[in-house]
Amino acid sequence: MLKKQYSIIMNKIFKYSLWLLLPLFFACSEEGLEDSGKGTLSGKVVTNGDNLPLENVKIETSPASNTVFTDAEGNFTIANIQSGEYSVSAQLEGYTTAFKAANVQNGQTSNVVFELKKSTANNQPPTVPQLISPAENEVLANIEVVFIWSSSDPDEDEVTYTLELRNDVNNDVEIFEDITDTLYVHSPLMYGAKYFWQVTADDGINTPVNSLVSSFTVQAAPADNRILFARNTNGNLVIYSSDEEGNEFQLTSSVENSFRPRRNVAANKIAFFKTQGAYTDIYTMNRDGSGVTKVTTATKPNGFNLSEINFCWPHNSDQIYFPSFDKLYRINSNSQGLQLVYQTPDGSLISEVDVNVQFNMIALKTNNINGYDVKIFVTNLSGEHQYDILTGVDGAASGLHISADGQKILYSYDISGFQSAEYRRMQSRIFLYEVAGGTATDISGDTPSGTNDLDPRFSPNEAFVIFTNTSNDGISQKDIYMLEINSSNNSRTLIHNNAEMADWK
């Protein structure tokens, strides 16, 4: 009985004590939550790789808090979030969901940055490239080809292309990778070869897709094209050859600046200027445009204006003569044996040169730094002055060519005497200088008003002159004409449109 009463009393004491302790327990618990505090979670969401901000990305946390979305700059903020460890997710349609860990501390701002990758789950490959140019079985009339194809990507992914090129002459396989455009220019090709080409499109996600194989042929190299000239193509001068009927053949690439061609008949090669970077050098090539070889090295052609200077490769010599400011040099076509031939005594610049080795003649044109104060004269091969042709005149002059017998010299001169900082010529005409009589005759005939006749050259039989005619505005198209020297009316015939710097041998 006593035990039972004792048990009842003890239960009542426990229950009473428990009720007394409950307020204290909850008070302690509430004090612990307040100590953990609240902070701020902020961040930014960008694309993987190029770091472009992503808008409207859904940001959630685990344990759960507020759900927010990024703004136009890719930024987000969750304020008054309970302190603690969180897993933060970033979700946007078309991108793979990303997760970041964050530790939010009382009264502080925690930052996270997401770089979302595009989802590839439903990504489609690029369309099969359709080969456009050259067309199937097309015959090209030059050694440069412009490949054109079409392809697109349904998901607008960045696509790179690989071009594979084979031929039926050898086992070479040329592969051009990481092309970002649907156009690709390639040179040189082999004359007479048949080529096969294929394009592969790769978006970096799906399996690359291949086009069909297409073929084209390069025509055989012309063996009898005797006329050379340069043509302006997309800002570059490109060298062509043609026959007397006007059939043209491209010899140099349109992505390089090549000009002022000079053919050496004995060597059966062509010398020309080519610009690479800041430098212009003399190169040689075969008559079909192959076998390009650099001739000049440390000492380079130069003058007051590179487009206004020329060089000479005499037909019965292996030495090329070229100006470099106030000096005239000669160098073997194999780039050996550089020699100083002549230096102007007054520091004037040499711009034009022609050489007749058989008759021990060098014709030179000099001028000041602006292209004026012109002198045209003849020295011997040792650089000793012989006689003057043109001196003490105002205006510009250009183009020198000595006849085969050394008795005539062609040049052009602006009879207006006009001079300007832009080196503009107003009325340039062609003159034929007779060495025996020391007289110069205007042979331009009826030059169209407002135009200039420039860069005259003898035809192989020296009965005609081939030259450039252009408007005196200095910016219009240049064309090549031919006129008969002893004709009563000096009538002119158009040979090539958009062409200049002719040579005919």
Image (spheres, rainbow, N blue to C red):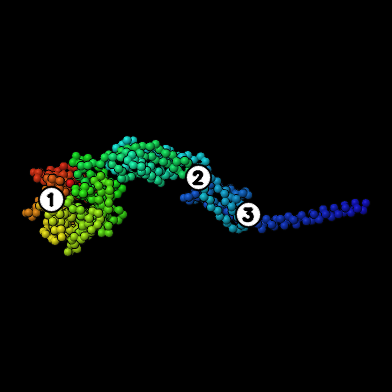
Residue type indicated by callout 2: Lys
Look at mark 1 in the image and give the residue it sits on.
403
Q: Secondary structure at mark 2?
A: loop
Q: Position of residue 18 (x, y in %)?
A: 80, 54
Mark 2 against mark 3, which lies toward the viewer? 2
For the residues labelled 2 and 3, the Cα–Cα distance comes to 31 Å
Q: Secondary structure at mark 1?
A: loop
Look at mark 2 in the image and give the residue it sits on.
118
Mark 1 against mark 3, which lies toward the viewer? 1
Residue 77 vs residue 361, the one in the foreground: 361
450 on left or right of 156: left
Q: Residue at 14% x, 52% y: name it.
A: 402
Look at mark 3 in the image and give the residue it sits on.
84
Q: Position of residue 161 (x, y in %)?
A: 40, 43
Above/below status of 423 relative to 163: below
Tag 2 or tag 1, which sits nearer the N-term?
A: 2
Q: Secondary structure at mark 3?
A: strand
Residue 130 vs residue 470, the one in the foreground: 130
Q: Residue at 33% x, 39% y: name it.
A: 168
Q: Residue at 29% x, 46% y: name it.
A: 253
Q: Position of residue 404 (x, y in %)?
A: 13, 50
Q: Position of residue 319 (x, y in %)?
A: 20, 55
